[in-house]
Amino acid sequence: MTMTTRSTAHPAIRVRGLEKSYGKREVLRGVDFDVARGSIFALLGSNGAGKTTIVRILATLLKANAGTAGVHGFDVAAQPANVRESLSLTGQFAAVDEILSGRENLVLVARLRHLKDPGAVADDLLGRFSLTEAGSRKVSTYSGGMRRRLDIAMSLVGDPPVIFLDEPTTGLDPEARIEVWRAVKELAGSGTTVLLTTQYLDEAEQLADRIAILHQGRIIANGTLAELKRLFPPATVEYVEKQPTLEEIFLAIIGGDNSDAADTEHLGGQG
C-alpha cells in the first residue's frame, strides 16, 4: 500500500487506549481520539495533564506502556521511520539560531533535508509567513511573534503532511499570539493537519475544528465547539451590557497593527 493510499484511507492521526506511567504515577490512562486530515485538532488541558506526553509518543520520542497510535497511516511503534518522515514537531519554545538570519535558518534546514534549491524553499516560506522583509536580518533582532512564525516555517521545510504544535504561544504577548494564530489557520487552509496542544481556552476556541479536553490522563470530552456547548443547558436570553475584554482594549489602543513594521519596534527583544 502506498503512502498516498494510506493517507486517504485513515485519519491523519489515530490514538487508541494510550497509556503511559512513570513508576506509580499514571500520566495517560487510556486515551482515544482521531484527527481528520487537513484539520486543526486542539488538545486542551492544564499543566501536567499529559498533553506533551501524547505529542512525544506520537512523534516517536517516547514509548507508550499500552495502546496504539498511528500518524499518516503508519504505526508509531512498528513504523517509526515512516512516522518521522510524515510529521514535523514544533516545541514549546522557538528552536531558531539567533546568530543566523531568518533566511539562513530556513536554508540550513532545507540543506539538512537534502532538498533541491534550498534558497527557493527559504524564500517561499518567508513569503508564506510574512517574513520576506525581515529575512536578511539576524533572528536576534526578531520579536517573539516573528521568531515563532519562523520556527513554524522551519517545521514546514519538506512539506510534512502533519505538524505538531506543542503550546506554540507560551510566553507570547497578545500581538504575537494573533500572528501565530493566523499562521496556524493558513497551515490548515493549505491542507496540513495540525495537532495543537494548549492550556489557553481562547486559543482552542479561535483555531480548532475539534477540541479534546484532557484531564487526569483521560479525554473527558471531544467534539466541535458547537458540540461541546450543547453539553450545557440551553442559554437563557438576558440583557447584558457587554464590556470590552482587556485584549480588545490593548489592541485598540495600539491600533491593532500586527505587521512586521510593528514588530520592528521590538528589535532585540521578545516582544
Image: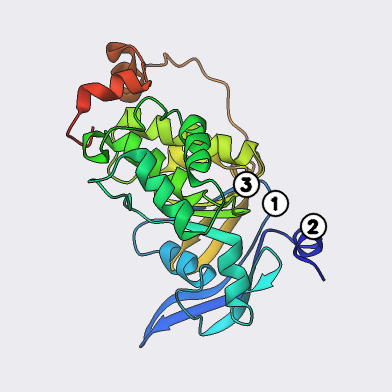
Q: Residues within 10 Å of mark 3 (few under 14, many from 20)?
A: many
Task: Please provide percent x and percent y for residue 251.
Answer: 33, 18
Q: Which mark is residue 8?
A: 2
The N terminus lies in which quarter of the figure? Answer: bottom right
Residue depth check, mark 1 versus mark 3: number of the one nearer the observer = 3
Q: Earlier in the sequence, mark 2 or mark 3?
A: 2
The answer to whether residue 125 is seen in the rendering is yes
User: Which residue is depicted at the point 22% across and 37% down?
Assistant: 270
How far apart in space, not on screen, are marks 2 and 1 (Cα)?
8 Å
User: Which residue is depicted at the point 45% across and 28% down?
Assistant: 130
At label 2, the amino acid type is Thr
Marks 2 & 1, CB-CB < 8 Å contact? yes
At label 3, the amino acid type is Thr
Q: Is residue 271 positioned above or below 31 on the image?
A: above
Task: Please provide percent x and percent y for residue 143.
Answer: 26, 33
Q: Is residue 65 positioned above or below 123 on the image?
A: below
